[in-house]
Amino acid sequence: MREKKREMTMRVKKKRMIVMSREKNKRV
């Protein structure tokens, strides 16, 4: 359970990072 949860959070964090980078690129 914990392992899966950690994996999910990692994926979410990665996705957020990508989204944030995209937003920054759009602004610039």
Image (tube, grey):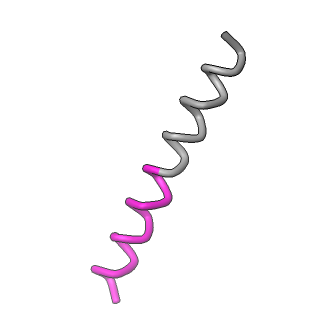
Residue sitting nearer the eye, 21 or 1 = 21
In the rendered image, the residue lying farthest to the left is 3
Q: Start and end of the magenta stretch?
A: 1-14
Task: From the top left corner, tell me how far across and down residue 16 is, in percent.
Answer: 55, 46
What residue is rendered at 46% in x and 52% in y? 13
Q: In this view, does 6 lie to the left or right of 14?
A: left
- Is residue 18 located in the magenta-colored stretch of the structure? no
Q: Is residue 7 left or right of residue 25?
A: left
> How many numbered markers are drawn?
0
Task: From the top left corner, tell me how far across and down residue 3 is, in percent.
Answer: 28, 80
What residue is rendered at 43% in x and 50% in y? 14
What residue is rendered at 60% in x and 31% in y? 22
Location of residue 28 with respect to 16 vertically, above or below: above
Task: From the top left corner, tell me how far across and down residue 21 is, in percent.
Answer: 54, 29
Location of residue 15 with respect to 21 vertically, above or below: below
Residue sitting nearer the eye, 8 or 21 = 21
Location of residue 8 with respect to 3 vertically, above or below: above
**Which secondary structure type mostly characterizes the magenta part of the structure?**
helix
- Is residue 5 located in the magenta-colored stretch of the structure? yes
In the rendered image, the residue lying farthest to the bottom is 1
What residue is rendered at 71% in x and 15% in y? 27
Q: In this view, does 9 lie to the left or right of 4?
A: right
Q: In which quarter of the image is the C terminus?
A: top right
In the rendered image, the residue lying farthest to the right is 27
Residue 1 falls in which quadrant of the image?
bottom left
Residue 26 falls in which quadrant of the image?
top right
